[in-house]
Image: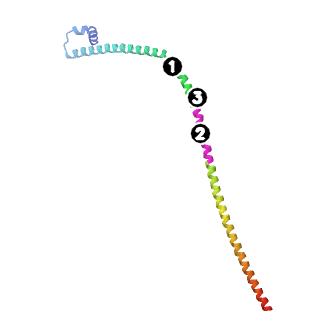
Amino acid sequence: MAALVEQRTRTRFAQHWTLPVNSVRQRRQLELERVGSQADVLQRITARQQLAAAASCISGAARELSGLGPLQQRCEELVEQARRPLAEAAEAQAEAAKLRVQVEVAAEAQARAEKAAREARREAEAAREAEARMREQLRDAEAKEEEEASKALKAAEVQMLVVS
C-alpha cells in the first residue's frame, strides 16, 4: 500500500523530481507537497476502505434484520404475557395497601377500646372504693346510733331506777 502511495505521488509530481533543486527552501517545499499528496492518497484509500467496511456492516445488518420479524413478534407476545402478571401484581399491591389501611384503622380502634376499658376499670375501682367508704360510713353511723341508743337506754334505765 505504501508503494502504491509513493508511486502515485511520484507520477503526480514527476516534473518536480526532475527539476534541479537549487535551494533548501525549494527542496522543503517539494517534500511538503509530496507528503501532502501522499496524505491525500492515503485519505482516499482509507475512505474507500471505510466505505467498504460500512457496506459490509450494512449488508450484515440487513441480513440480521430480515430474520428479526418472527423474533419481534415473539418479543411482543412475551411483553403481552408479562403485562398480565404485572397488572395482577399492581392490583395485589393496591389490595395490600387497602388492607394495611384497614389494619391501621383496626389497630387504632383497638387502642381506643383498650383505653376505654382501662378508664372503665378505673371508674369501676373508684366506684367500689366509694361504695366501701359508704359502707364504712354506714357501719360507723349504725355503730354510733347503737351506742347512742344504748346510752339512751341506760340513761332511761337509770332514770327509771331513780324514779322508782
Q: Residues within 10 Å of mark 1 (few under 14, many from 20)?
A: few
Mark positioned earlier in the residue sequence (3 or 2): 3
Question: Circle 3 sits in a helix, a strand or a loop, which is it?
Answer: helix
Is residue 32 shown above or below 18? Answer: below
Numbered circle sitting on residue 84: 3
Cα separation, mark 3 vs mark 2, equals: 18 Å
Question: Circle 2 sits in a helix, a strand or a loop, which is it?
Answer: helix
Is residue 36 shown above or below 125? Answer: above
Query: Could you say which is closer to the camera, residue 109 or residue 68?
Result: 109
Q: Percent position (x, y) of residue 76?
A: 54, 22
Q: Percent position (x, y) of residue 121?
A: 65, 59
Query: Could you say which is closer to the camera, residue 94 or residue 7?
Result: 94
Is residue 91 shown above or below 111? Answer: above
Mark positioned earlier in the residue sequence (1 or 3): 1
Quadrant in the picture for residue 85: top right
Question: Circle 1 sits in a helix, a strand or a loop, which is it?
Answer: helix
What residue is shown with label 2? 96
Amino acid type at circle 3 is Arg
Q: Residue at x 59, y 39 (%)?
A: 96
Q: Residue at x 60, y 37 (%)?
A: 94
Cα separation, mark 1 vs mark 3, equals: 21 Å
Mark positioned earlier in the residue sequence (2 or 1): 1
Cα separation, mark 2 vs mark 1, equals: 37 Å
Amino acid type at circle 2 is Ala
Q: Percent position (x, y) of residue 30?
A: 24, 14
What residue is shown with label 1? 71
Quarter placement of the N terminus:
top left
- Contact between marks 3 and 2 (CB within 8 A): the answer is no
The residue range painted magenta reads 88-106
